[in-house]
Amino acid sequence: MMIARTAEKELRNLSRQFKAIAIIGPRQSGKTTLAKHVFGHLPYINMENPDTRRFVLEDPRGFLNNYKSGAIFDEIQRTPELFSYLQEILDNAKSKGHFILTGSNNFLLQENITQSLAGRIAYLTLLPFSLSELINLDVKSLNHQIFTGFYPPIYDQNIRPVKWYPNYIQTYIEKDVRQIKNIYDLETFHRFIKLCAGRVGQLLNKNSIAIEAGIDGKTVDSWLGILESSFIIYRLFPHHKNYNKRMVKMPKIYFYDTGLLCNFLGLTEASQIETHYFKGSIFENFIISDLLKTKFNHAIPANFFFWRDNVGHEIDLLIEEALNLLPLEIKAGKTIHSQFFKNLRYWLKLTGEKKGKIIYAGDDNQKRSEGIEIISWKSLPEMDSLV
């Protein structure tokens, strides 16, 4: 049974407005399945096939002549030679939804599309399943869901996370990383990702990572870019408005998938999350990544930030919408506690804003008279209003 994707509706909308659509996201997030499901009338070509790549390299015009009525080009970043030729075809094409391009590397797609297809193509970022997409499945517990993660093959093929993630990581490092940048010391790169996992939800100190990984600062920047462009990590930046306070300037680091994060942290079963010293940060990652999916599934930019001053007052997540800022505090506790409100009340008083939300690991939802709404993690599927 195929699990319905929320992004399908937006994908169909985009196909009625644009001649080409790029579906980007991490490897194994369901891009190909969604493209084939929505555009089953188009021929499908996988650019990871070496014979196909050779044809493209030797005769790009001849290759595209075979698909005058459109096609799905999977893993298009493997054949960047095509982009400039696609430009000419799209300029002459009259139909919408002509070409569907998928890719598991955002950097290469952006670089080539910017040069050749600007204004001719729409983007849709497809991450692994959101909580709302799994709502009809039996979610055993919060920690079980966090540990299992959200990658479709785990659900489609009923594979245990402890078996699937190591193989995924091996494929990613050996295949994708070499395509993006020819990194020879893959063992050090693997250790680098683990060091990033050990800093989840924390301010990103690149000097500290460089020292522990035994690499220089430029390499840290380069490798962080690789992890971002291949949808492994997400950098959350501090909000720029300071409200007359000295603010931190370093971003925080999160993983797009909590199952992958747990694997890099060395967890082997869900129960270990409960007593893990990163429990709060893991839960925070879980909430932020799910809210990101809500934005991306509607093809809306995720204007997400955090706020922190130099004396420790902090808001875990600020969602910027036009001139409004919605503050969210994320708490891993299952019982509502007075400490949940401390930073949120401080920020509301400082800024004059009237509303805020607390998302926590408990079961009950509450609305407080001071404009603060308390939301259970189980209610995340109902938070489409945030988009």
Image (cartoon, rainbow, N blue to C red):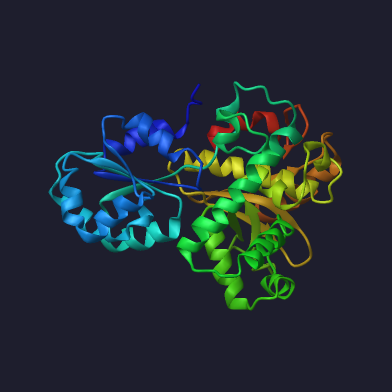
Q: Position of residue 50 (x, y in %)?
A: 35, 53
Outermost residue on the front side: it is 51
Location of residue 368 with respect to 248 vertically, above or below: above
* Residue shown at the point (26%, 60%) measured from the top left: 57
Q: Is residue 118 visible?
A: no
User: Image quadrant of residue 359?
Assistant: top right
Q: Is residue 321 above or below residue 240?
A: above
Front residue (pair 226, 58): 58
Question: Which image quarter: residue 385?
Answer: top right
Look at 25% across and 51% down and name the residue there.
120
From the viewer's perspective, is residue 59 above or below residue 73? Answer: below
The answer to whether 207 is drawn above or below residue 29 in the figure is below
Q: Position of residue 153 (x, y in %)?
A: 56, 35
Q: Which is nearer the eye, 214 or 3?
A: 214
Q: x, y percentage for residue 154?
A: 60, 34
Residue closest to the eye, 244 or 17: 17
User: In this rendering, does residue 365 appear at all?
Assistant: yes
Q: How many marks?
A: 0
